[in-house]
Amino acid sequence: MLQITKLHANVADKPILKGLTLSLNAGEIHAIMGPNGAGKSTLGYVLSGRPGYEVTEGSVTFNGQDLLALEPHERAAAGLFLGFQYPVEIPGVSNVRFLREALNAQRKSRGEAPLSGAEFLKVAREQATALGMDMDMLKRPVNVGFSGGEKKRNEMVQMGIINPALAILDETDSGLDIDALRIVGDGINRIMRKPDKAVLLITHYQRLLDYVKPDFVHVLADGRITRTGGPELALELERDGYKELAA
Amino acid sequence: MPAPTRHDEAWRYSDIAALEAAWPLPAPESIIVPAGGHYARTIVQDTGSIHQIEIAIGKDATAAIHVLSIGGEYGRVELNVTLHEGADFKLGAVQIAGGTQTLEIITTVTHAEPKATSSQIVRSVLAGTATGTYLGKVAVARDAQLTDSAQSVKAMLLDRSATANAKPELEICADDVKCAHGCAIGELDPMGLFYLEARGLSPADAKKLMLQAFVAGVFEGAADEEMLIETALKKLGELV
Amino acid sequence: MSDDMDIKDKAAWDAAERVADYEHGWSSDIETDFAPKGLTEDTVRFISAKKNEPEWMLEWRLKAFASWKMMTPPDWAKLNVPPIDYQDAYYYAEPKAKPKLGSLDEVDPEILRIYEKLGIPIAEQKLLAGVEGGEDGGLPQRRVAVDAVFDSVSVATTFRAELERAGVIFRSISEAIKEYPELVKKWLGKIVPMHDNYFATLNCAVFSDGTFVYIPEGVRCPMELSTYFRINAENTGQFERTLIIADKGSYVSYLEGCTAPMRDENQLHAAVVELVALDDAEIKYSTVQNWYPGDAEGKGGIYNFVTKRALCQGRNSKVSWTQVETGSAVTWKYPSCVLNGENSVGEFYSVAVTNNYQQADTGTKMIHNGKGSRSTIVSKGISAGHSNNTYRGLVRVAPNAEGVRNFTQCDSLLLGSLSGAHTVPYIEVRNPSAQIEHEATTSKISDDQMFYAMARGLNAEEAVTLIVNGFAKEVLQQLPMEFAVEAQKLLGISLEGSVG
């Protein structure tokens, strides 16, 4: 589904990714772990096309398409979803309105009919309920006044509504207490653990992996993948730290 | 009387050539809101005209003005408001300019007597080489105690050569008052735009949505709120 | 830290307890040599001749004088100033017993007594009095070099030798014109052009003395530099001129203090201060302005029309203005920064107190021309009595200045219902990437605050002084320690009689 080959990327002229190669197939969940500053968040931003993240070498294909040639919204329409580490507050724009516009923009570009207000609200209510989020919160401006945990939960509601083929979840577990972590973990499994979908979990700690079992665990250090293994690698990292393994 | 020049404070950012062509101006429109009364008005400036309105708001009376200024090479909406005891004035104003337009909103709100309240919200969206100006003076007379006045002024520049001018001025001669103003000028939050695009909105739609949020709320409570929002959106659509 | 604060608080309290209308309100019996009263081309020639100036300087002055005659005073400020009779003042006054530099014995004892009365911090007094011996040991760790300008003439400059070893030039401007003509010519009138405004042009014609500072490349000035200005003679205008040049990578902190005796007539002070900071240089300029404010009925006092401007010319250059304005009958003053350098920084921290019939119209201009330039404005205005206190400021962003940031906070505190507090910010932005924020608030001291402070044992004036110092804290913190103590005292003294 996703093929990253020898990817190099700069932020503000500073090389962050230095030849990263990674391949995800449909039906797989991959976890990327690594120390702070290794380039984990950069990978998420490069894949979703954030301005200022400049690819200098390498290629990324997504379902056979050149991902890097697409604008951020085209990547979204193609089925890619980035769960933000720090979801952005947008005063004055309600969650419901934002998501309906976003979803219908994606549907339109795929040649699908737009959802009516009622149809959309039905989907939104299902997802919000499943993630234990109050419908009132969906009517409030996007992320404004939300706690850290509420923002992350809101990301999952958005993922449920948009229903992407590939989710890149950047530190979705940070800022969550134990109960919220379980709800979010269940959400990821429910929405994304399907034969035609894939997930790239970017995380610093292995605790989310107790709820979302990865098929593969990769260590990202100094801009490239230095080790790949099964779920047991996450436990090993948790026990021994990154220093031992990164080298 | 000769036409003003840039040395006149109230005209310092005006399109002087356009002003001279329109000079002399007719006498300002005068509105008196009687004690206990209520007055509401919507002004849509879409032809490049100069509106000068004087409003005296009587004891415990209220006035609510909504302004949408979008049209013409030079457009000016000037409000001169005097508040008597316990009166209330609300202004919600939006100006959207592109090309070589010069639009300005000028307000002088005088709290002449105690316990009056005023609130002004002004939003400008400027593209091309347009100039958008807000000169807003709140004056609190001696002994106009318990005045409560707020000004919120924001401008958004869409292009490098657009100009936003703001002068949110306070002139306060009484001590037991609450007067605050805030002013912010900037561009659309790039992280916000990216967030919207990452959820599938095209760059133009993301911009429009952010701009709509920027001006939404200003027209709240207007009798013709929907018309104002629609007209504003249409103009925004032309600029993005 | 807490010790410092205790000392500061104690000093502030001591001062607040003193009951004096104007501590510096005496005049000293020093024989003075005047230029003839009035202002003509001859006055300009007289001043220039008195200073043994080179021809180019005289020509410059005459050119300014010719222009000034054609100009009119600015009328846009919120000030009510009666017409000034420029022919009814002296433009040059020189203490007759002029001391030679460097030796205490030659300093007129009367002048030394003045330093004492001025409340020049003890450490500086010792140094000033011990010009030669003062540099050997037994000194406090913090050293300040002082230039004292008395009426029209610089009377003493301390620490010159040590500064010179570091390459720092610290001179009266009259000396600098003769000794460093190239440096002076390069920058004089380049930051504040000759025709900038009525008062600046007048200053160009008749400036009498002032301070010149040059910090060479890479030098961190080893001590704080300080000038005390005092108008002593009657009917005398003071027109000093300061020029500070911070070369690449240098740093200097400069302090300026001003006082004048009580006089029934109004006296004119029209200074020009020019600062230039080259690449990576930093200038910190602090002022405690305590010119005579006039009496409680508004009689007398200094007319303070000052043009201060800094050119942040170099990359990463930084200029920080801090001012505590408590004196003068009329203040018209806008210390500004022209931010030409990429990533240059301008700061303006101001406390302005007006009481009785004082009028202040003061603020700043931040002109952003350089990419990534940033500025911060914090203005605290305190109005009491029948006074009027105006903040007037401009933030301008040029079309090519990407990534500019400005934050402005203007707070006004009103004491009593007869005073006025005004805020006039101008914001002009031509680049979309700018982030400009302006906030303003107006408040009074609440009855609850007063009651709380008084329930803890403070009397009304002490309570006001305490609360006002809290209100102004953000600005006072920017001052070097010695000045902070002085400023706290002044806030209390300035507000005497404003409550109850």
Image (cartoon, helix red, strand yellow):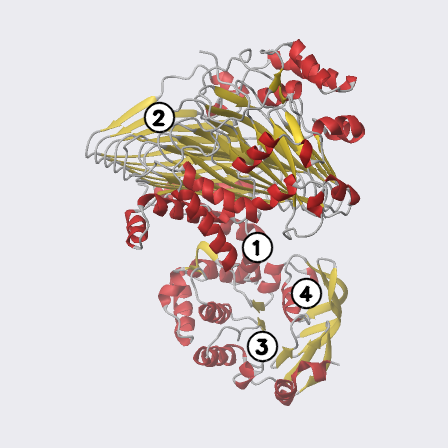
Residue C336 position (above or below residue C189): below
- Above/below status of C469 relative to B59: below
Q: What is the three-letter code of the residue carrying label 3? A: Lys
Q: Which residue is mark 1?
A: B202
Disc number placed over residue B53 in the picture, else none: 2
Q: Residues within 10 Å of mark 4 (few under 14, many from 20)?
A: many
Q: Quadrant of residue C422?
A: top left
* Residue C276 shows in this picture: yes
Q: Residue at x 43, y 24 (%)?
A: B50
**Which kind of residue does numbered mark 2 sit on?**
Ile
Instruction: Check residue A197 in the rendering and tell me which mark sits there, or answer none.
Output: 3
For the residue pair A33 and A113, the one nearer the viewer reads as: A33
* Above or below, C277 relative to C43: below
Q: Amino acid at mark 1?
A: Ser
Q: Quadrant of residue A55 in the image?
A: bottom right
Chain to which the residue tagged by mark 3 belongs: A
